[in-house]
Image (cartoon, rainbow, N blue to C red):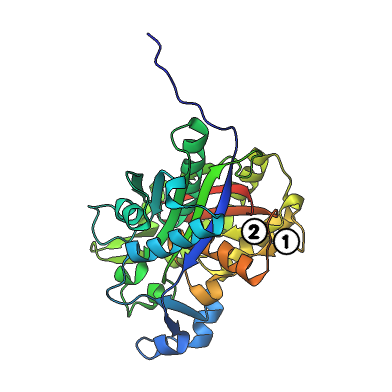
Amino acid sequence: MTLRQNTGPAATAILGLGSTQPDRVVTNDELSEIMDTNDKWIRDRVGIVERRFAADEQTVADMAVVAGSKALADAGMSPTDVDTVIVANCTSKAPIPNAAAQVADRIGVKAAAAFDLNAACAGFCYSLATASDMIRSGSSKGVLVIGSEKLTDVVDPVDRSTAIIFADAAGAAVVGPSDDAKIGPVTWGSAGDQVDMIYMREGKYIFQEGQSVFRWATTKIAPVAMKALELAGIEPSDVDVLVPHQANLRIVEAIAKRLRAKGAREDMIVADDIVHSGNTSSASIPMALDHMRSAGTVHSGQVALIVGFGAGLSYAGQVVILP
């Protein structure tokens, strides 16, 4: 007996983007009032000037609903045009119920396939790849991918190794069929032997070995980005926009430098959303893209190389054509 298999379109694309941030802006000077730090120390080490903190009652699901709704509107689509919702996150207060089912219902995607995906700061790239493959396999007609994080729930507010870095936000993308391939193959993986670099201390607060993470990211992620280019069949010189996970401005700049040494153009645009948004984990890549597009820094049709990396240690990257 041979079972029938679904088939889907050969190609996919990002059709729309959306993002949201809390209203409260937290400056370096404000943080220096509650811990041993100052504006120069923070800027020199991580490049952050300010970040956004959510209100106590604001949740991962709340932010995901806003970002997801904006992405659908940007794509000119209604909730009935998608049948799957993926919420990438690692900061929901409870593992049950998942955020995705709540978000889908609140947005109006009824009877959705809905699940959360935890690959920490690589979550958006993992989710984007999963969404693209679901559509190409015929398992889904359209997918709403959302990275949403409330990191202030899992950060010790007086631990300067983490409290100066992490922030809250959500970013989203609508993924659907396309006549031409606009989402390239994913390259992804993990380094599970190094899980102790980033973990939940006492099951409550994020701990990270900053210098070890910095060394790993600045040496291991550029090769991942180069592999994504190879899989997509393009050269470094073809990249218009580089959007690494916004972990630390020095890491972002180091990745860009390594890619330029491999042939990327000097005029390649490099996302620096970290400066005014902080590290928002799985939200950082889609939000950076949305902010850059809104500012007119990037435009539709440009070639973007995105790469996420974080706890796990997990990493993933792909080439996309901007909507």
Q: Locate residue 184, reporting x and y percent.
A: 61, 42
Q: Position of residue 84 (x, y in %)?
A: 40, 44
Disc 1 marks which residue? 268
For the point 76% across and 64% down, the residue is 267
**Quick one: SS at disc 1?**
loop
Can residue 215 be seen by looking at this rendering?
no
Q: What's the residue type where badge 2 is placed?
A: Leu
> On the picture, is 259 further left or further right than 276?
right
Q: Considering depth in this image, is 266 or 84 the residue closer to the camera?
A: 84
**Mark carried by residue 92:** none
The reply to whether dot 2 and dot 1 touch (C-beta < 8 Å) is yes
Tell me the amino acid under the disc marked 1: Met
Please indicate, yes or no, whether residue 241 appears anywhere in the rendered image.
yes
Q: Furthest residue to the top?
A: 1
- The residue singled out by tag 2 in the image is 242
Q: Nearer the viewer, residue 64 or 201?
A: 64
In the rendered view, would you say 250 is above or below 145?
below
Q: Dot 1, crowdedness within 10 Å: few (<14), some or many (≥20)?
A: some
The mark nearer the N terminus, 2 or 1, is 2
Q: Which quadrant does the C terminus fall into?
A: bottom right
